[in-house]
Amino acid sequence: MTRASLLLIAALRRTAGGLLLLVGASFVIYITIRSAPGDAIDAISPMGTPPEVKAKLMAEFGLDRDPITGYVAWLARSAVGDFGESLVFAPGATVMDVGLPAFERTLALAALALAACLVLAVLGALLLGRPHPRQQVITGPLYFLTAAPSFVVAVLFAQATNWFVHTYVEQGGYETPPWYPIPIYSESWMPYLFAGFVLVAGDGLFMDFLNAVRAELQGLRSAQFIAAVRAKGARTVGHIARNMVVPLVSGYAARLPLVLGGVVIVEYIFTLDGAGYLLLEAARERDFPIVVGLSVLFTATIIVVNLLADIVRALVDPREVARGG
Amino acid sequence: MEAKAERVGLWSSGAVVAVVLLLGVVAPFVAYDPAGAVDYDQQLVGPSAAHWFGTDGQGRDVALRLLKGIEAFFLPGLLAGLAATTLGALAGAVAGYAEGWVRSAVLGLMQLIDTLPRLVFIILVCTILNPSISLIAAVAAVLFVPNIATVVRRKVEALGSEDYILAHIAHGFRPTRILLYHIIWLQCRPLLIRQATYVFGYVLFVETALSYLGDYGVQEPTPSWGNMVAQTRELAGAAPWPWLFPALAIVITISGFLAFGNLLARHEEEALR
């Protein structure tokens, strides 16, 4: 068979696997809903929900049927993006109308922050070069500092900002400075930049990525085929770069779930209008359709990103397809 | 690489782990009445001999609250680490040793759990069930099983074709004994220690983060490092010690545990070679 048809088969197989995973993961989410203590409908509806809304919720989540047929009915509606209507947060609006724009912002923030982290990790690995004991003067403290959870970084950051604003006001400033990172009324992208910075700096993400990239780079540089390329007098940069694509793509996909977790809390602290903020606010107000809809969106995103990473790996590295994976 | 810096790292992170373990064991025996600790004559007193880390906005001793705050994540974190490594080692051993549908079923289940976004799923569970730190730790333990199972499975697969393991098989040792004792207990301990410290660190992270946010974590007046950091909301800029010390405690404990797990695993792996 030609390479193109092999690739197509591999892509189709993985897509089918991804769909299966999505069905399985949504089943786990559904069973979690059903496992509520007492009457499930009371557990998932806000205080003082009128009976007709409760009846509608019961039908939407298939709580009036047995778990399997209830799940199938719920899945059939969720699959076309119908997660029901918001109850408290934005009464009457569909979950997708409220959730999707917010989720897009969140995904963009997480994806860009992780991309920035990847670029920084590659630059760091190139700058540091071969591991040397003396480098631990730099990497040791860095390891310590970046291990801070993102919410702690965000809090320290907000405190530092407060201090800066304080001195700014003391010096006679009275308008909101253009760099102010907490959104107030202006359509500024500064808060997103600061949130991205916090995501890169927190949760041990950067050092973890840096160490992974350094280990890969080190392994490649001492690989025999690179020695052969060098012996022939050719440049090794292209060969190393191409062989770094697979580990970098894998590393990116593997760390996205962590960033999607961190972004929930960071958005809440910076009150950014994203899916993380929405998720926590909806959870607080027991707006259950939104919580479930966003959970499914987050899960589906992780599956799709892993699928894309698989396909990119297959495109770059013929061995991935030859293994029949 | 087995340099002086690495030894320093191992000992200093080991000291952090030892101190946290010690304080975690001592904390339940220290009497503390969250309501009775309030003292409005002693608000925001700076660090002194009487109050090592000062007092907070309600005149409560920060050092004592730091100590009692350990209870919030200590036992749940340890149990979650133990449960996750046990389940993960078993799942990894089965997936690495079994063939056919058993292997596929375990691998599929692991992949399924692995696709759930951890924090989002924990929040979902908290909205449905009665939220508590024990519940959060239990869910976190299950969510970490695939990670652990993967590293154990790779090890089992790699060792399965080693001569000495084949020799054990030829000697007629039972597969369970070879798997559980010769492979997992003797060869995977460093891996498992590292993973257990990750799980502990994660439980600490989730507990403090949710307690900081306020809805599902530890509620005031019961102290948690997370809800102590949350005092920044009321105290912005007034005095740093009520929130700075807990923030530092979180960072030092998490990085201490992660570094200790990593360095100890590397140390032991070198010893195994």
Image: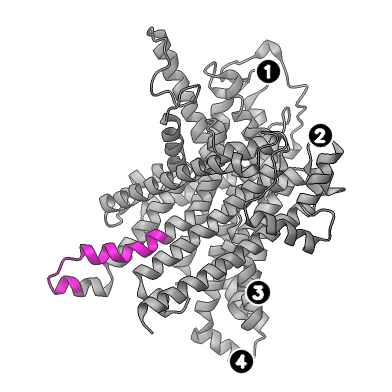
Q: How crowded is mark 2: few (under 14 residues within 10 Å), some or many (20 or more)?
A: few
Could you tell me what secondary structure mostly forms the magenta stretch? helix
Q: Mark 1: which amino acid? A: Gln
Tell me the residue that label 1 is attached to: B58
Q: Quadrant of the N terminus of chain A?
A: bottom left
Report x, y in % for residue B63: 63, 28
> Gap between marks 3 and 4, in whole Å?
30 Å
Left or right of A307 on screen, residue B118:
right
Taking the magenta stretch, the answer to whether it contains residue A237 is yes
Residue at image location 50% in from the left, 22% down from the top: A184
What's the magenta region? A229-249
Compare residues B14 and A265 and report the one nearer the observer: A265
Nearer to the camera, A27 or B121? A27
User: In the rendering, at what x and y percent does residue A248 appear?
Assistant: 38, 59
Q: How far apart are marks 2 and 1 (CA)?
A: 32 Å
Label 2 and label 4: CA atoms lie apart by: 66 Å
Name the amino acid type tagged 2: Met
Judged from the image, the secondary structure of the residue bearing numbered disc 2 is loop
Q: Which kind of residue does numbered mark 3 sit on?
A: Ala
Read off the residue under disc 2.
A47
Q: Closer to us: mark 2 or mark 3?
A: 2
Q: In this view, does A191 lie above or below A136?
A: above
Residue A10 lies in the magenta stretch? no
What residue is drawn where x is 24% and y is 67%?
A239
Pointers 3 and 1 within a single chain: yes
Quickly name the residue at label 3: B105
- The chain ID associated with circle 4 is B
- Residue that label 4 marks: B171
